[in-house]
Image (cartoon, coloured by chain):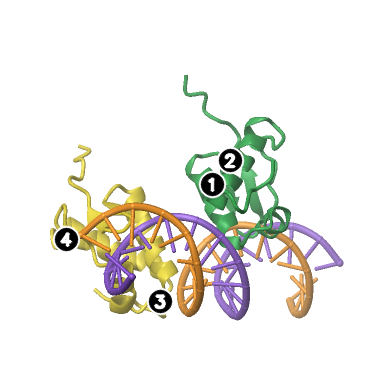
Chain colours: A green, B yellow, C orange, D purple
DNA sequence: AAATATTTGTACGTATGTATG
DNA sequence: GCATACATACGTACAAATATT
């Protein structure tokens, strides 16, 4: 999964989708820290604003929890919502 | 209500509180547009990021609705939630 | 204890895109 | 076409919390 810098979809939505997939697929399991903002910037070649908007989305969805000074972690559980 | 630039509370939270008050008090009634980002920047002497973060909070709370190209409007109703 | 490094949070600026009037 | 207004995206700097040396 790579980001299309020339595509129509906003970069932060693309990045959010990538991270969301990695979480839902188990590649990033509950409790695991996702890459730091600085790493995500390098990996995906986007600015900090874009990274933070993407992570913000995941936080709003309850998928991750950010802790100042430590990192951002995949939430313990996705409530099944069935 | 003015913003304390030297206070402890983050500027965007202070601004959000001010706008929230203006909405809840009826000073900004439902349907009314709140001042544009550029105006809020001038009025409160803060940057765009600060304004957008404050407005984002109010959007998350359902108090306002932003429409690209038109403005940001006080939501029709605050659900009473009693 | 103290200094350093890492990481998220806040705050500013600028430029460009998109939608509306 | 032009002006206005929100949206996206980049950059920088510093603060605050945490972890490590």
Residue B10 visible, this orientation: no
Label for residue A17? 2
The image position of residue A5, as x and y in percent, is 62, 53
Under circle 3, the secondary element is loop
Task: Using a 10 Å C-alpha cutoff, classify the residue at mark 3 as few (fewer than 14 neighbours), some (14 to 19) or many (20 or more).
Answer: few
Under circle 1, the secondary element is helix
- Quarter placement of the N terminus of chain A: top right
Question: Does the CB distance between marks 2 and 4 fall below 8 Å?
Answer: no
Question: Does the CB distance between marks 1 and 3 fall below 8 Å?
Answer: no
Q: Is residue B79 above or below residue B68?
A: above
The image position of residue B64, as x and y in percent, is 27, 52
Q: Can you identify the residue that label 4 sits on?
A: B28
Q: Is residue B39 above or below residue B63?
A: below
Task: Using a 10 Å C-alpha cutoff, classify the residue at mark 1 as few (fewer than 14 neighbours), some (14 to 19) or many (20 or more).
Answer: some
The residues tagged by marks 1 and 4 sit, at their Cα atoms, a distance apart of: 32 Å
Instruction: Name the chain letter of the residue that bears numbered label 1.
Output: A
Q: Can you identify the residue that label 1 sits on?
A: A13
Under circle 4, the secondary element is loop
For the point 15% across and 59% down, the residue is B25
Label for residue B7? 3
Instruction: Name the chain letter of the residue that bears numbered label 3.
Output: B
Question: Does the CB distance between marks 2 and 1 fall below 8 Å?
Answer: yes
Q: Are marks 2 and 1 on the same chain?
A: yes
Instruction: Name the chain letter of the residue that bears numbered label 2.
Output: A
Q: Are marks 2 and 3 on the same chain?
A: no
């Amino acid at each position: 999964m790579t980001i299309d810098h020339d595509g129509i979809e906003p970069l932060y939505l693309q990045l959010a989708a990538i991270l969301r997939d990695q979480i839902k697929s188990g590649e990033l399991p509950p409790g695991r820290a996702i890459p730091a903002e600085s790493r995500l910037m390098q990996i995906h070649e986007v600015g900090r604003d874009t990274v933070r908007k993407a992570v913000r989305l995941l936080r709003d969805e309850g998928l991750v929890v950010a802790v100042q000074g430590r990192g951002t972690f995949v939430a313990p559980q996705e409530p099944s919502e069935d």
